[in-house]
């Protein structure tokens, strides 16, 4: 069974903290994505990576960075967490090619207080 | 970036009725249009997809139609059941292997 695993289901962090969200996939997929999900706004792409050490900005990259040192792992970093980054974060992976299914993790609900 | 408009935002139907969700887009280069279903507490899962060289695709009670000229595509669910209750997202590929999503439709099927 294919799997995308996010390290935490729920996180509570303080304003100004550096936050790491981890994602691991076991399908040998080239592409990995980080989305943010907010009510009424759908899924918005933060960053994606199409290869190890490669990254591209999505639609809302401000305040975030990413790291992909190994093919199976893609990390989202909030350099200095703010309350407006309270949200559901979803990681996904897919094969290369642009017309392939994306597999999602279960999501991390982050609350910044 | 690419904008995908999805309607309605909420949809309530009686069990056995049909449900239709519609999306419009602007990027004429998009050629892959998947639909995802998100159940409570889970990540989205692909339920059906359609490529630009096809106008309609069916999978049991679910069908998707695509009108590339008008730049809109729709999800049709027939004989709805309570387990169809979920949030549904349309999406499409754009740029370099990216998927862009609509704002979601919350479908509630009442017994």
Image (cartoon, coloured by chain):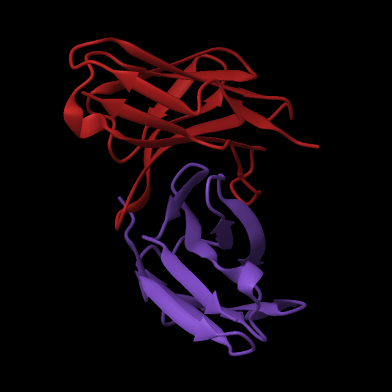
In this rendering, position of residue A83 left or right of residue A48: left
Q: Residue furthest bottom?
A: B17
**Residue at figure coordinates x 47%, y 77% from the top left:** B21
User: Residue A77 occupies which quadrant of the picture?
Assistant: top left
Question: Who is closer to the viewer here, B73 or A111?
Answer: A111
User: Residue B38 occupies which quadrant of the picture?
Assistant: bottom right
Question: Who is closer to the viewer here, B41 or A96?
Answer: B41
In this rendering, position of residue A1 left or right of residue A70: right
Q: Residue furthest right?
A: A1
**Residue at figure coordinates x 58%, y 32% from the top left:** A31
Q: Quadrant of the N terminus of chain A?
A: top right
* Chain whose colour in the figure is purple: B
**Residue at figure coordinates x 50%, y 35% from the top left:** A107
Q: Quadrant of the C terminus of chain A?
A: top left
* Chain whose colour in the figure is red: A
Q: What x and y, as percent, mark residue B53? A: 64, 72
**Residue at figure coordinates x 29%, y 10% from the top left:** A18
Q: Residue furthest front?
A: B111
Up-down relation of residue B108 to residue B46 (above or below): below
Q: What x and y, as percent, mark residue A32? A: 55, 31
Residue B54 in sight in this render: yes
């Amino acid at each position: 069974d294919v799997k995308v695993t996010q390290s935490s289901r729920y996180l509570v962090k303080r304003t100004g903290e550096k936050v790491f969200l981890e994602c691991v996939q076991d399908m040998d997929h080239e592409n990995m994505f980080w989305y943010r999900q907010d009510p009424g706004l759908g899924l918005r792409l933060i960053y994606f990576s199409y290869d190890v050490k490669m990254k591209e900005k999505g639609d809302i990259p401000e305040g975030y960075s990413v790291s992909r040192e190994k093919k199976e792992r893609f990390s989202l970093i909030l350099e200095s967490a703010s309350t407006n980054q309270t949200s559901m974060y979803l990681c996904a992976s897919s094969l290369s090619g642009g017309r392939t299914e994306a597999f999602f993790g279960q999501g991390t609900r982050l609350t910044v207080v | 970036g690419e904008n995908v408009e999805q309607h309605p935002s909420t949809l309530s139907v009686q069990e056995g009725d049909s449900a239709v969700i519609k999306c419009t887009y602007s990027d004429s280069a998009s050629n892959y249009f998947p639909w995802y279903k998100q159940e409570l507490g889970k990540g989205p899962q692909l339920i059906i997809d359609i490529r630009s060289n096809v106008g309609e695709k069916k999978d049991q009670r679910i069908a998707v139609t695509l009108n590339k000229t008008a730049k809109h595509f729709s999800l049709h669910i027939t004989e709805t059941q309570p387990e169809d209750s979920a949030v549904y997202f349309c999406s499409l590929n754009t740029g370099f292997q990216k998927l862009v999503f609509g704002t979601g439709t919350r479908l509630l099927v009442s017994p």
